[in-house]
Image (cartoon, rainbow, N blue to C red):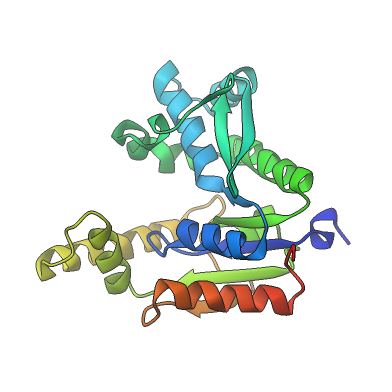
Amino acid sequence: MSRSSTLPVVAIDGPAASGKSSTARSVAEQLGLLHVDSGALYRTATWLAVRQGLSEPAAIVAALDQAGITLVPQGAGLEVRLGGVTVEPAIRDDAVTARVSEVAAMPAVRAWVDRQLRDAIARAGGGVMDGRDIGTVVFPDARLKVFLTATPGARAERRLRQVDRGGDPAEVAAEAERLAERDRLDAGRAVAPLRQAPDARVLDTTGLGFAEQVAQIVAWAREAGLSAD
């Protein structure tokens, strides 16, 4: 039995705009566990690549090793800091967003991030983590794996509502088409493709409210004994 299987780990995977991070954060708060956002580390790697003009995987990993990156508890989650200073909101800007998929597809970068994620969970004694390959690659022995999904149309409506642009049917349809194409690319990529772990519990949130989907995952976690209570 691997070390990860002895820890209270909830792995939440799913396609883009499925609400993984917000759901995972709320689940972690209700269970009294730590929330770890894997995407923040990929964005940090991309931010360094953009900032230093790097494109080779080995150079990006070397920059990460030299940067003094730490994961610091902040509320119910972990904040990425460089030299003691938070990298938010810099890692969320458009230049980073434009390259994050490219950088995150690099095996060497993924291996570096996976090590940080496993170390963070080990130090915390467990937690809730979201991504696209948490239950299949990062924590294949997680005691609860959830595959969070919804139709492209539902995900498009939610994404546009977040930026107050949810009322135009044509815009929703265009966003749904973009998400469907992103699903296809994520599922077909060679490195850590988006896929459902065989033992994951599928939660289709198309017809669910946010509180309902959180409550369902919390119930599954408590059934599995995954709670700090």
Q: Residue furthest right?
A: 1
The answer to whether residue 164 is left or right of residue 183 is left
Is 37 located above or below residue 211 in the figure? above
**Image position of 32 (left or right of 203):** right
- Nearest the eye: 53 or 161: 161
223 lies above or below 52: below
Name the one closer to the observer, 19 or 28. 28
Q: Quadrant of residue 114?
A: top right
Residue beneath the point at 55% across and 50% down: 191
Q: Quadrant of residue 150?
A: bottom left
Residue drawn where x is 42% and y is 39% of the image? 100
Residue 69 appears in the rendering = yes
Q: Residue at x 37, y 34 (%)?
A: 96
Q: Is residue 110 left or right of residue 172?
A: right
Q: Residue at x 78, y 47 (%)?
A: 122
Image coordinates for residue 22, horizontal then vertical, percent: 46, 58
Q: Which quarter of the rendered picture does the C terminus lie within?
A: bottom right
Percent from the top left, x then y, of residue 116? 67, 38
Q: Quadrant of the N terminus?
A: bottom right
> Height in image: 24 above or below 62?
below
Where residue 161 appears, x then y in whole percent?
24, 62
Observer able to see residue 53: no
